[in-house]
């Protein structure tokens, strides 16, 4: 099945050339249309002053916004402001500032006296959010669970950065993949490459297309430009489309009209203070922001930041192929194997953070024969491989820059252009670990925003720079300096023979020592970490764009296999929404739509041109791996909101339509109701469904990864490969080989005796993943605005859960035949022809695939969370939250492990005072999470429970317009890991100084 059509590339290129012209013409036309309404009015000028109610001090930086319009301004250092507008009287001004109660004032004439006094607000409880319904609403009456961090909450957090502060938000689980790369998730099924959680920055999806996920905050806002963060746990697909079935975060930046002047931020930090595998290291981060508005008509802002530090290290040396597994030489095959009385003794050791020893994946192993206590038995031996710490770089950096131009065409219309670019290093985990090095992501956005509509279009550009895949790096290091698997196995066997000739037959007493010495002999000549030879080989391999295992059988032969990750993509997106409530009147109506096209440049390792032959897909021909690959989706939604019973009951109904050419169209509904009792108690109920099209990588990948090829879910990828309908599950192949080896040493007779253990896969054609979600909640502000209670509970049902399953395809044979059965025998690990024990003609071996497909079972997960904040006395605030998440266990095993990867219980408690003494504040947070099982294709293992303390003390220097903050995360240096295969994290001490509001008018 062909993926492209005649002329599509030319049409797309033509569309790209005219896209900007057409959009700008549309923007200009809209501008003329809307500005025509204000031409007949003359400019009026409103001025005044804002002070604090208690101390009557002038308040600087107060936002003054015209309600229902774009127009607005801010107060200067003396609390004064001037607003010029063409709006007709009367209109309402909204005054807001962090730490003060918002206030509205109706302006009826130019003679209105605007002397505004704002009263302090002890803590949040009446915030306005926009993410839950795509329109502004009270957080108390949101139809779904939503949390908000504003500037004050971010400043008071003891977390090292605003992005780290998300870890303390109710319902959020944050995992650290790298010092520069954190991954948020809500409500279960957590993975380091989280396809189910969306992250927006000012309406722009921050994902790196080929990697499939937002790279933390790599190109997001700096500390100086972030205004607030809104997080909605759970499905958000009804309004935001197919990438948000587990939740989303919306990062909102500061407007240059309301936050002006020069700001500077400097952080110094220390990590690796003992027990994390590296020496103590200094981290520095510098950020600068400058924004200015001219006559409330034109404004601009510029941001830049640079971070440099030493990354956390993943060096857990546990064995995931433990002695009780069938893949680890069990005693059922030979009682003598009990001599491998520790995981480290077993030659099939498969380390958590080791590569090139992948026994569980059925690669990087050899099958030899050993006679133990007089019984001849097959033994699985894993290649030695290399530890992760020797294959990745410790130093990481993140450079960010963004700039924006804003022009108010009228009081109700604003046109803007924004550009973002970020370059980052770090470690990324998908099916394998990837060393990200100089990854560059850029974003261009143009937007037209009115009081009741927004139209935006953006392009995201991704390039993976000098990144490389750690597994093929380790594989090729072993091959170049240790020979092929067959050569290595021969050396290993010869060493065992030599041991027996010198020491007598292998017994339980000498078995472990014999295999240890055999490994040393087989590894002779291997490039060792720390040597110049090792360094030179790594530098060579990581720059070669070919992951095939094709090196010469001669050690140190010219390198032909590599590990370079070279991916380039473009994402084109356009969307619009229009609030028609003022026109419809009988209910509030919101409509919107979007379109997206991904364009991927084939790299020969992860993405290929499927119009080429199978033989040529991974080959570079005339400097190219083929034509670009495209992936498209389109959608639209409508939302109706209506209040009843004197606005006590608010009902929401929305429906979304999404289409991807590879799948049937999907309809996504959401129904919600919020009922308010006594103006304080807000109860809500929500039912919604959501769908997720396979991500770009899940749909179209064709990963050329040596012995196991990872393939996407679209059916045409299967053409000519036959893994969907002519394969056996890897798990059944392991059981089959264990039974055969227990019976005898892998003969054809034994294989045919146990052939019924092989399970034919018959994998389904992939379809979108579906979630059906029910949620209830309660939110209230009680005791004269001193107590906030926020509770929610949910249950989700996932249908067609997308994941990976590994299968074996018999080469040139049909599953179910005897010849196909013989192809599954574990005679060697080169997946090439093997001589059967009977001496018959060799089978052709097997091809191995890891396939993205849908689970057969439905999965039900459920949970609840409770957040409480209480003003103890004065400005002392105590708060906390507790979160529970669980999954119902199915009655039957599925074709792959879904990986819930979430602790049942987690929570935190905070205590602080933003001004315990004049200009001095503090905050401490205690965090805890339960132990849980982490399951993934890379590493599976238990994660221990842990708890940490974070704390900060801040000092304000008003005369210098500065704030100094001293703090620590994991103050007691409790070393912990957040996921199997992840880094060990410890204490991080930091100090920051922020200078805010220089060069203001």
Image: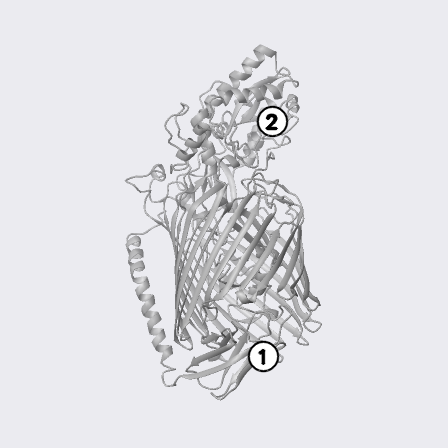
Secondary structure type for disc 2? loop
Residue at 62% x, 53% y is 860
Task: Give the residue furthest to the front.
Answer: 959
Residue at 38% x, 82% y is 37
Q: Residues within 10 Å of mark 2 (few under 14, many from 20)?
A: many
Residue 355: % across, % down: 51, 34
Check the image and report above or below for 373 versus 314: above
Label total for image: 2
Q: Is residue 854 left or right of residue 145?
A: left
Name the foreground residue: 824 vs 259: 259
Q: Is residue 195 left or right of residue 863?
A: left
Name the foreground residue: 630 vs 309: 309
Residue 540 lies in quadrant:
top left
Q: Residues within 10 Å of mark 1 (few under 14, many from 20)?
A: many
Residue at 31% x, 58% y is 16
Location of mark 1 (residue): 117
Q: Is residue 303 left or right of residue 372?
A: left
- Chain-order first, disc 1 or disc 2: 1
Secondary structure type for disc 1? strand
- Residue 179 appears anywhere in the view: no
Residue 598: % across, % down: 39, 54
Name the foreground residue: 170 vs 893: 170
Check the image and report above or below for 841 versus 220: above
Q: Nearer the viewer, mark 1 or mark 2?
A: 1
Residue at 35% x, 77% y is 33
- Residue 23 appears anywhere in the view: yes
Location of mark 2 (residue): 346
Name the foreground residue: 495 vs 990: 990
Per the model, the C-alpha gap separating discs 1 and 2 is 75 Å
């Amino acid at each position: 099945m062909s993926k492209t059509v005649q002329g599509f590339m030319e049409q797309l290129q033509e569309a790209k050339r005219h896209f900007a012209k057409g959009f700008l013409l549309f923007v200009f036309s809209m501008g003329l249309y809307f500005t025509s309404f204000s031409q007949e009015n003359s400019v009026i000028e409103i001025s005044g002053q804002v002070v604090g109610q208690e101390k009557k001090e002038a308040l600087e930086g107060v936002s003054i916004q015209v309600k229902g319009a774009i127009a607005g301004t801010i107060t200067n250092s003396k609390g004064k402001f001037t607003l010029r507008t063409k709006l007709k009287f009367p209109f309402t001004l909204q005054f807001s500032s962090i730490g003060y109660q918002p206030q509205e004032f109706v302006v009826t004439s130019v003679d209105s006296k605007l002397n505004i006094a704002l009263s302090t607000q002890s803590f949040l409880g009446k915030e306005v959010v926009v993410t839950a319904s795509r329109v502004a609403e009270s957080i108390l009456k949101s139809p779904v669970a939503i949390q908000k961090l504003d500037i004050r909450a971010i400043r008071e957090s003891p977390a090292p950065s605003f992005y780290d502060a998300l870890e303390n938000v109710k319902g959020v689980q944050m995992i650290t993949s790298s010092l520069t790369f954190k991954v948020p998730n809500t409500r279960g099924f957590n993975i380091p490459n989280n396809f189910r959680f969306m992250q927006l920055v000012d309406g722009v999806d921050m994902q790196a297309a080929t990697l499939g996920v937002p790279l933390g905050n790599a190109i997001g806002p700096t500390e100086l430009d972030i205004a607030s963060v809104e997080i909605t746990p759970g499905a958000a697909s009804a309004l935001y489309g197919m990438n948000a079935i587990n939740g989303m975060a919306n990062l909102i930046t500061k407007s240059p009209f309301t936050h002006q002047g020069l700001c500077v931020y400097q952080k110094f930090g220390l990590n690796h203070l003992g027990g994390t595998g590296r020496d103590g290291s200094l981290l520095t981060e510098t950020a600068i922001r400058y924004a200015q508005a001219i006559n409330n008509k034109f404004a601009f802002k510029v941001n830049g930041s640079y971070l440099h530090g030493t990354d956390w290290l993943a060096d857990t040396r546990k064995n995931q192929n433990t002695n009780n597994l069938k893949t680890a030489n069990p005693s059922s095959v030979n009682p003598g194997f009990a001599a491998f009385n520790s995981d480290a003794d077993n030659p099939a050791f498969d380390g958590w953070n080791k590569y090139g020893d992948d026994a569980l994946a059925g690669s990087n192993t050899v099958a030899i024969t050993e006679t133990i206590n007089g019984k001849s038995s097959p033994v699985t031996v894993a290649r030695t491989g290399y530890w992760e710490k020797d294959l990745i770089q410790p130093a990481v950096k993140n450079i960010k820059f963004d700039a924006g131009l804003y022009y108010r065409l009228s009081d109700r219309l604003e046109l803007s252009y924004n550009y973002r670019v970020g370059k980052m290093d770090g470690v990324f985990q998908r099916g394998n670990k990837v060393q990200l090095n100089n990854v560059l992501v850029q974003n261009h956005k143009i937007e037209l925003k009115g009081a009741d509509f927004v139209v935006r279009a953006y392009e995201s550009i991704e390039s993976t720079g000098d990144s490389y895949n750690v597994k093929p790096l380790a594989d090729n290091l072993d091959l170049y300096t240790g020979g092929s698997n067959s050569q290595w196995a021969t050396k290993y066997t010869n060493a065992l023979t030599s041991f027996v000739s010198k020491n007598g037959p292998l017994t339980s007493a000498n078995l472990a020592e014999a295999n240890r010495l055999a490994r040393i002999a087989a590894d002779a000549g291997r490039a060792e970490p720390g040597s110049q030879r090792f360094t030179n080989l790594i530098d060579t391999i990581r720059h070669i764009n070919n992951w095939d295992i094709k090196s010469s059988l001669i050690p140190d032969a010219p390198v032909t296999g590599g590990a370079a990750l070279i991916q380039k993509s473009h994402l084109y997106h356009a969307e619009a929404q229009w609030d028609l409530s003022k026109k419809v009147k009988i209910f509030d109506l919101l409509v919107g739509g979007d379109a997206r096209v991904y364009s991927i440049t084939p790299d020969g390792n992860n993405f290929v041109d499927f119009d080429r032959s199978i033989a040529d897909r991974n080959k570079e021909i005339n400097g190219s791996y083929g034509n670009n690959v495209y992936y498209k989706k389109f959608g639209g939604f409508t939302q109706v909101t209506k209040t009843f019973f004197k606005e006590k009951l608010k009902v929401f109904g929305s429906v979304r339509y999404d289409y991807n050419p590879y799948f049937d169209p999907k309809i996504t509904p959401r129904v919600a109701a919020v009922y308010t009792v006594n103006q304080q108690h807000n109860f809500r109920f929500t039912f919604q469904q959501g769908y997720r099209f396979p991500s770009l990588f899940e749909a179209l990948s064709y990963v050329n990864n040596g012995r196991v090829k990872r393939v996407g879910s679209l059916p045409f990828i299967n053409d000519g490969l036959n893994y969907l309908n002519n394969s056996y599950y890897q798990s059944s192949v392991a059981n089959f080989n264990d039974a055969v080896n227990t019976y005898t040493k892998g003969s054809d007779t034994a294989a045919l005796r146990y052939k019924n253990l092989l399970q034919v896969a018959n994998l389904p054609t992939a379809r979108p993943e579906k979630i059906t979600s029910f949620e209830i909640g309660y939110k209230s502000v009680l005791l004269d605005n001193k107590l906030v209670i926020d509770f929610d509970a949910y249950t989700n049902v996932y249908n067609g859960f997308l994941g990976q399953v590994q299968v074996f395809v018999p080469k040139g044979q049909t599953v179910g035949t005897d010849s196909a059965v013989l192809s599954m025998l574990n005679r060697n690990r080169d997946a090439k022809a093997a001589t059967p024990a009977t001496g018959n003609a060799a089978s052709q071996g097997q091809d191995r695939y890891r396939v993205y497909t849908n689970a057969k079972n439905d999965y039900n997960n459920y949970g609840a969370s409770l957040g409480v904040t209480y003003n103890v006395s004065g400005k002392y605030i105590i708060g906390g939250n507790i979160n529970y998440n669980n999954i119902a266990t199915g009655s039957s095993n599925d074709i792959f492990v879904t990986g819930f990867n979430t602790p049942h219980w987690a929570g935190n408690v905070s205590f602080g005072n933003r001004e315990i003494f004049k200009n001095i504040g503090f905050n401490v947070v205690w965090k805890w999470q339960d132990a849980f099982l982490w399951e993934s294709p890379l590493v599976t293992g238990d994660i221990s429970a842990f708890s940490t303390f974070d704390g900060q003390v801040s000092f304000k220097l008003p005369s210098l317009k500065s704030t100094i903050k001293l703090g620590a995360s994991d103050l007691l240096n409790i070393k912990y890991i957040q996921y199997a295969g992840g880094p060990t994290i410890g204490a991080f001490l930091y100090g920051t100084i922020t200078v805010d509001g220089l060069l203001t008018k």
